[in-house]
Structures are given as structure tokens and as C-alpha cells.
Image (cartoon, rainbow, N blue to C red):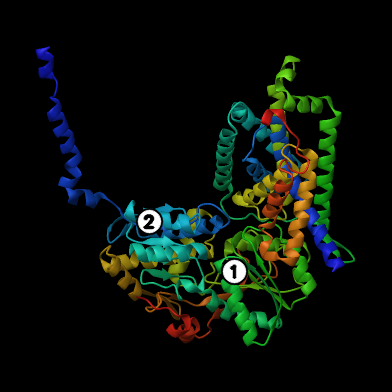
């Protein structure tokens, strides 16, 4: 028995040894940190109707990191992607990204309703948040905060850009918009523009999300006989609407216009049914794309086997702005990253991409596009009609003054 | 006003027809197997995806294979998974079939990607018919006729064939059917396959109208549960009446109060269940009491 006791490690020593092993990471913090990658959060929906778009947003952001050989500030970096199933779920996941995954900034915000909640959470957690898709005006308007930056052109601005195209068809408008933040914002902006132009709203429908059958709405539009239908439907709902608009013989009879179309929305409609005039931020087939954008489009095609949708570019440019700003800040400190994002600027043809300092809204020209008469390539649906505003010097004016947009950062 | 009401009622009947098809499979599976199949919407999605793939590779006639394949997958799922749930708590079957739905959706997403797939009605069904105020497309007439045919065949099958009688007897007293020397487990496999195949038919018919995405089941499964609850769990005729009623109520709400069109079917269900807790034609089933 005595011999056996000698062979065994005494319990007290074993406990000390285990404690010592557990303490190794604390004893050598420098070594451990050097091996840890720098983490950036990606907060984008993984399921639901918007998931088709977020797949491209995420691909674009991942490609932006890959093009930098997976490094930021010269050290290995990784994107941690969590879901944004609802405004509440999104804020919980943002907290998880910051507190558990220790990310230094967050990219994301696919839906306006989610992004509005996420930007408030970003301010509470004091973490830089770069919103890559949501377009609700208030994100960089009255709800703006120091920690939030936003790429997509606000609904009110895009509506102003599209209004002349709608007015070309007439002044009797029918509104069909989604009954959540994005659609309500479009309805409000469009009504103001119509009123200013002396037009009449001949009908309005606020449609619940995930509506599967639009035939009853389309029958109402047919009865109202408007000059033009101004839409405010998002993602899959827009796709379904356009399919059924064609199926019920309305394509070509009453023009349809909407802001912020995504390539993935129209790809799902199909060449037979697609129609309308829209605004969008970027088009892979636009000959005026910058050399960097052309290189991105080529890299995307090579990696994923299909052309980059506008959402892929949106994921790419926001990620690029954030990664380059962290590089410039030479730190993961939130305040330094924010200052670097405010100073970030890259050329874009005869204009540039940059975030405006007083509201953190990216200033960029939009495209006015119409569906081609004949579609021969299943990914190339649009003719670019104009780049708006036509004079780049008007960008600041078109996006509105600080007083007009109501952003007051504390 | 009468013209508007007529027009919207016809539109609602087409939508209701699709709801009936989705719900009837769910109702059969619950009525005969006692399983609340949360994966039913996923089989609807599979019907849509198989339809567009078959048309792309083999042309329109091949679309008829879509529900057969979906039914086959349903039978495999029953043999491997569902039959282990027959003697378990209803909550277990809910959780397991919900997991199956997520698995099917994720698999579809993996193969086809998350974005919508373009798919239009067949060229020979393009165009529409106008009778006074009523506008209906040829394709939607086709949907209504197909729904009616499927329902008639199903009714004949359940009521007039020996196999149908075994099914109905097995749903009421499985022990007695077993004692008569009938291989009930095999019969139940076919029933589950049949329910899934009908869901596949609904998916196939909806594909040219709805957006074909991995998440399209969301638009199918909730109305299906509402229709089954209103019609009475396990009631064939109840599901038919309830489906058509829900379609018409939704269409008329769109005309007069569009903001409420998403919620109206749930309000309708709540009202119906307050008045008739077993649903319109629901009966007392000893097995489930």
C-alpha cells in the first residue's frame, strides 16, 4: 500500500499542477494574443426572404478580406457571422459578438427594422457598426449616432432621384408598399414628392411581409387605373409581385417604378416577367465601374461562378471601408476606428466614396436603371439610364443638409 | 361594388384552392397517423424545386414526376424517422418534424442557393380570361381544375377503395386492424407518402406564381395549419371548406382593409374556434382525447 502511495501524484500537487496549467494563458498573454485573429462581426440574416440577398452581402465582405490575404493591420483576421432573425434577435447577437466573440467592429443590417435596433445597440455597446444594406432614412437621420455608418442611400434621397422618372408617366400614382420600416419610409417620401409635384394618389396598399399572392392587390390597381405604380416592396415580395404582375397581364400596361432594387430580386422574377424602372447602387455590367470594382467583379466571378450582384458589391465596399479604416487607425480602439472611417475616402470615377462626417452617411451616386427590352443573359437585366445626381458636385446637396435630415450626434 | 366583390371572390377561390391542397395533406397525415407534421411546408418547397428542375432538364411533361418524387422522399422519411414517433408525445413529433423541415430547407439552400429561382407558367397556359368584371389567368383556372381533380380522386380513393377503408379503420382503431392481419405499418408509410405527394402537387402548382426560394414553406405552412384548425383536425371536407373560406376572406380583406390581410386568417381562426372548438367539421376522436 505504501509503495502504491509513492507512485501516485499527491492530490495537492495534482491540483497545483492543474491550476498552473490553467494559468498558462494568463502567464503568457502576449504569446496568446499574437496567435488570436482580429475579429470583425458580420450580422446578417441566415434565413427568411432576405437570406437570398444576405448570402451575396456576406460573400462580398468575405472576398474583401480574402483580397487582403485575410489580414487587417498585418495580422490574421476573421469574420464572425451571426444571424439577425428579428430586431430583438439581432441586438442579442450583436451583444454576443461584442462580449463573447470580442469583435472590434460589426458589419451588417440587412433589413431596416433590424438595422434601426442594431444601431441603438451599437451606441450602447460603443462598437463601430457599418450598415451595409438597410435604407431607412432615420438610420443616418434622426436616429443617427456616432458609432453607426451606413452605405445605402436613404429612402428619401433615392425617392427624390426616382421621382422624375415616375412623373414622366403621369401624376396619378398608386402606392404599394411593405408594411414595415422600409415600405413606410418609401410611402412617406413618395407622398411628399407627389404632393409637391401637384399629383394625386389614386390608391395605396400597405402589404404584410411575406405575402404570397398579390392577385387581389393587382386587381385593385387595375380598377384604379393609375398612370404609374410606385412600389416599396422588399426582396422576395417584390419578386412575387412582379411575377404575378406579368401573369395577370399588367406588364407593359401600367409602368412600375421602385427604389433600391437588388439584382437577386430581379433574377428570381425571370426574363419573361421582369419589368420596371428602379434605382440601385451598382451594376456589374456598368462600363463606368472603377478598375478596383472591375477587379472585384472578376474575382467574384472566378470564386463563385456567377456575376457579382449589387449586394455583393455592397458587402465588399463596406467591408473594405472598415478594414482600411482599422489599418489607418492602427488600433482596434472604437474611437480611433470611427475617426478613420470619417476620414476614409476612395476615388470612384469622377466622384469618390466617403462617409459624411456629420451623419456618417456614405455619399455615392446612384444608378437609374430600366429592365432591358430583351434579356439574353440571365444575370444582365438592366440598362443604365443615368447616374444620379448627374453632376457629382451636387452629391452633398442631394443627400440633404444637417438641418434637413435631422441628425444630431451626441 | 358587386363587380369588385365578384372579382375578388374568384381571386380568393384560387388562393383558397392552393391552401386546400397544402392543408389536405397535413390533415390526412394528422387524421390517419396522429402526427402534427411541421415538415409539411418543406415538402411543398421540394415540390416546387423538383418542378423547376424537371422542366429545365426534361420539359413540361416531366413536371408530373415532381409530386411522385416528393411522395417517395416522404415514404423514406416515414420509414427512417416518423414511424418512431407514433407512440410518443405530440410535442416530440412537433420538434422532430420541425427539425426535419430545417434540414430540408438547409439542403435546398445548399444545392440551389438562397436566392429566388425564376419560373413562369407554361407558355401554353399564358394569357387570361375576362368575363365582365372577372379577370382570371388561364394558369389559375388550371390550378383550380387540378385542385378539384386531386380532391375528387382523393375522396374516391378514401371512400370507395378497400385500401381507403383500411386507412380509415386504421386511423380509428389501429389495434383491431392489426388483429385482422393487415400490415398497418406498411399502410402508414404509404399514407405519409401520399400526404407529402399532395403537398408536392401544391408546391408544383405554386412555383410559377410564388417566388421559389428555400424559405417559401413559410408562406405555406401557417395557412395550412390555420385551414386544418378551422376545418377540424383530420376532416377532409372541413379542410376543403375552410381553405376556400380563408382564401375568399383574405381576398376581400385586401380589397377593404389591406393592412389587415396578413392577420385576418388568424382572427378568423380564433373566431371559429371560439364558436366551434373542434373546428367546422371536427369530430370527437377517441385516440386523441
| Placement of A135 over or under B146, stated as above or below | below
Q: Are marks 2 and 1 on the same chain?
A: yes
Residue A162 appears left or right of B273: left
Tell me where residue B149 sits by quadrant.
Answer: top right
Mark 1 belongs to chain: A
Q: How dense is the environment of label 1, judged by Cα within 10 Å: few (below 14), some, or many (20 and up)?
A: many
**Badge 1 is on which residue?**
A183
Q: Which mark is residue A358?
A: none
Left or right of B276? Residue A88 is left
Q: Is residue A130 visible?
A: yes
Expressed as whole percent of the image width and height from the top left, the position of residue A361 reads: 43, 75
Q: Nearer the viewer, residue B124 or B259?
A: B259
**Which residue position is annotated with label 2?**
A95
Q: Residue at x 72, y 33 (%)?
A: B31
Residue A202 against residue B137 in the figure, above or below: below
At a point 74% along the width and 47% down the height, the residue shown is: B275
Q: For residue A43, what is the image quadrant?
A: bottom left
* Disc 2 secondary structure class: helix
Quarter of the image with the C terminus of chain A is bottom left
Left or right relative to A19: residue A83: right
Residue A291: image x %, image y %? 44, 70
Q: Reply above or below: B42 against B75.
A: below
Amino acid at each position: 500500500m505504501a509503495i502504491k502511495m509513492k507512485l501516485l501524484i499527491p492530490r495537492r500537487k495534482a491540483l497545483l499542477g492543474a491550476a498552473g496549467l490553467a494559468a498558462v494563458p494568463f502567464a503568457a498573454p502576449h504569446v496568446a494574443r499574437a496567435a488570436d485573429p482580429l475579429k470583425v462581426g458580420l450580422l446578417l440574416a441566415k434565413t427568411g426572404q432576405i437570406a437570398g440577398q444576405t448570402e451575396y452581402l456576406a460573400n462580398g465582405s468575405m472576398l474583401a478580406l480574402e483580397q487582403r490575404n485575410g489580414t487587417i493591420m498585418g495580422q490574421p483576421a476573421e469574420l464572425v457571422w451571426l444571424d439577425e432573425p428579428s430586431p430583438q434577435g439581432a441586438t442579442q447577437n450583436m451583444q454576443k459578438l461584442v462580449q463573447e466573440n470580442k469583435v472590434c467592429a460589426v458589419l451588417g443590417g440587412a433589413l431596416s427594422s433590424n438595422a434601426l435596433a442594431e444601431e441603438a445597440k451599437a451606441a450602447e455597446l460603443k462598437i463601430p457598426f457599418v450598415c451595409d444594406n438597410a435604407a431607412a432614412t432615420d438610420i443616418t437621420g434622426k436616429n443617427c449616432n456616432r458609432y453607426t455608418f451606413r452605405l445605402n442611400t436613404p429612402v428619401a434621397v433615392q425617392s427624390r432621384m426616382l421621382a422624375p422618372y415616375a412623373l414622366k408617366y403621369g401624376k396619378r400614382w398608386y402606392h404599394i408598399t411593405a408594411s414595415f420600416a422600409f415600405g413606410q419610409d418609401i410611402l412617406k417620401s413618395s407622398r411628399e414628392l407627389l404632393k409637391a409635384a401637384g399629383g394625386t394618389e389614386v390608391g395605396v396598399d400597405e402589404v404584410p411581409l411575406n405575402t404570397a399572392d398579390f392577385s387581389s392587390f393587382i386587381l385593385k390597381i387595375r380598377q384604379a387605373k393609375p398612370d404609374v405604380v410606385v412600389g416599396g416592396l422588399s426582396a422576395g415580395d417584390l419578386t412575387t409581385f412582379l411575377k404575378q404582375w406579368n401573369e395577370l397581364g399588367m406588364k407593359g400596361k401600367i409602368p412600375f417604378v421602385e427604389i433600391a432594387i437588388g439584382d437577386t430580386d430581379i433574377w428570381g422574377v425571370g426574363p419573361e416577367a421582369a419589368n420596371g424602372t428602379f434605382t440601385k447602387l451598382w451594376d456589374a455590367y456598368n462600363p463606368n465601374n472603377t478598375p478596383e470594382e472591375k477587379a472585384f467583379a472578376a474575382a467574384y466571378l472566378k470564386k463563385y461562378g456567377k456575376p457579382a450582384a449589387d449586394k455583393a458589391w455592397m458587402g465588399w465596399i463596406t467591408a473594405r471601408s472598415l478594414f482600411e479604416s482599422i489599418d489607418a487607425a492602427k488600433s482596434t480602439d472604437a474611437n480611433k476606428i470611427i475617426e478613420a472611417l470619417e476620414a476614409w475616402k476612395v476615388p470612384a470615377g469622377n466622384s469618390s466614396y466617403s462617409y459624411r462626417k456629420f451623419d456618417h452617411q456614405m455619399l455615392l451616386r446612384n444608378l437609374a436603371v430600366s429592365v432591358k427590352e430583351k434579356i439574353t443573359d440571365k444575370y444582365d437585366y438592366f440598362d443604365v439610364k443615368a447616374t444620379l445626381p448627374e453632376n457629382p458636385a451636387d452629391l452633398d446637396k442631394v443627400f440633404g443638409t444637417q438641418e434637413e435630415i435631422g441628425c444630431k450626434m451626441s | 361594388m358587386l363587380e369588385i366583390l365578384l372579382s375578388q371572390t374568384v381571386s380568393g377561390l384560387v388562393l383558397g384552392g392552393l391552401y386546400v391542397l397544402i392543408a389536405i395533406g397535413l390533415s390526412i397525415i394528422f387524421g390517419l397517423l396522429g402526427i402534427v407534421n411541421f415538415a409539411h411546408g418543406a415538402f411543398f418547397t421540394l415540390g416546387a424545386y423538383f418542378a423547376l428542375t424537371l422542366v429545365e432538364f426534361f420539359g413540361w411533361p416531366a413536371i408530373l414526376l415532381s409530386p411522385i418524387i416528393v411522395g417517395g422522399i416522404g415514404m423514406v422519411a416515414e420509414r427512417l424517422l416518423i414511424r418512431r414517433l407514433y407512440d410518443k408525445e405530440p410535442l416530440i413529433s412537433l420538434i422532430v418534424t420541425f427539425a426535419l423541415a430545417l434540414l430540408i430547407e438547409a439542403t435546398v439552400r445548399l444545392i440551389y442557393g438562397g436566392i429566388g429561382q425564376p419560373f413562369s407558367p407554361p407558355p401554353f397556359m399564358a394569357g387570361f380570361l375576362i368575363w365582365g368584371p372577372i379577370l382570371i389567368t388561364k394558369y389559375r383556372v388550371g390550378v383550380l381544375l387540378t385542385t378539384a381533380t386531386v380532391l375528387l380522386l382523393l375522396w374516391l380513393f378514401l371512400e370507395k377503395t378497400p385500401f381507403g377503408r383500411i386507412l380509415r379503420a386504421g386511423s380509428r382503431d389501429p389495434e383491431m386492424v392489426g388483429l385482422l392481419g393487415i400490415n398497418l405499418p406498411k399502410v402508414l408509410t404509404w399514407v405519409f407518402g401520399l400526404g407529402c405527394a399532395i403537398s408536392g402537387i401544391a408546391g408544383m402548382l405554386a412555383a410559377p406564381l410564388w417566388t421559389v426560394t428555400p424559405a417559401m414553406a413559410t408562406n405555406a405552412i401557417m395557412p395550412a395549419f390555420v385551414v386544418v384548425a378551422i376545418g377540424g383536425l383530420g376532416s377532409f371536407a372541413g379542410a376543403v371548406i375552410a381553405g376556400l373560406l380563408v382564401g375568399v376572406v383574405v381576398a376581400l380583406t385586401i380589397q377593404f382593409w389591406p393592412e389587415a390581410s396578413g392577420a385576418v386568417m388568424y382572427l378568423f381562426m380564433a373566431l371559429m374556434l371560439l364558436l366551434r372548438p373542434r373546428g367546422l367539421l371536427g369530430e370527437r376522436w377517441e385516440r386523441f382525447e
